[in-house]
Structure formats: structure tokens, C-alpha cells
Image (cartoon, rainbow, N blue to C red):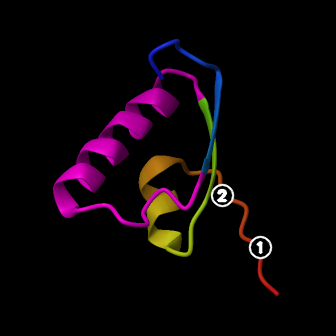
């Protein structure tokens, strides 16, 4: 995010995060999307997607 990318790809961003780091990361990523950035990520927690972006694609078996 330092170089101001337009698209950010992340895999399982919640794994291994303590609550403080997770809150900071979610705030940073939310700001990124609010400023026009595109965030594509995987997560087993569907609630996280609702925090970051209203457009969600959910894949199931």
C-alpha cells in the first residue's frame, strides 16, 4: 500500500492476527477501498467481507 497500488491481492488476511493488528489492518484496507482501490482477498470469515466492501463473491463447494 506504500506505493499506492490500484489492486491488492491478499490470501487469508485474518490468520494469525492479534485483535489489535487485525483492527488496524481492517481500517487500513477499508480506507484503501474507500479511496478507489480494488481489494481481492480470500477468507473463511464471511463477516470480514461485509466490513471491507459491499461487493462480495462467495464460492462454495
Location of residue 27 in the rendering, given as x and y in whole percent from the top left corner: 31, 40
As drawn, the residue found furthest toward the left would be 20
User: Magenta residues?
Assistant: 11-37
For the residues labelled 1 and 2, the Cα–Cα distance comes to 10 Å
Residue 32, position in %: x, y? 46, 28
Residue 41 spot, x, y in % from top left: 62, 52
Residue tagged by mark 1? 59
**In the rendered image of this protein, does residue 35 appear above or below residue 59?**
above
Give the residue at mark 2. Answer: 56
Q: Is residue 17 magenta?
A: yes
Q: Is residue 10 left or right of residue 30?
A: right
Q: Is residue 14 above or below residue 38?
A: below
Q: What residue do we see at 48% from left, 23% from top?
A: 1
Mark nearest the camera among 1 and 2 is: 1
38 vs 33, left or right, is: right
Task: Label 2: state its secondary structure.
Answer: loop
* Quarter of image, res 28: top left
Amino acid at each position: 500500500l506504500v506505493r499506492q497500488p490500484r489492486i491488492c491481492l491478499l490470501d487469508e488476511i485474518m490468520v494469525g492476527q492479534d485483535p489489535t493488528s487485525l483492527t488496524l489492518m481492517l481500517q487500513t484496507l477499508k480506507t484503501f477501498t474507500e479511496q478507489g482501490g480494488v481489494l481481492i482477498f480470500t477468507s473463511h470469515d464471511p463477516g470480514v467481507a461485509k466490513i471491507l466492501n459491499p461487493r462480495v463473491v462467495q464460492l462454495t463447494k
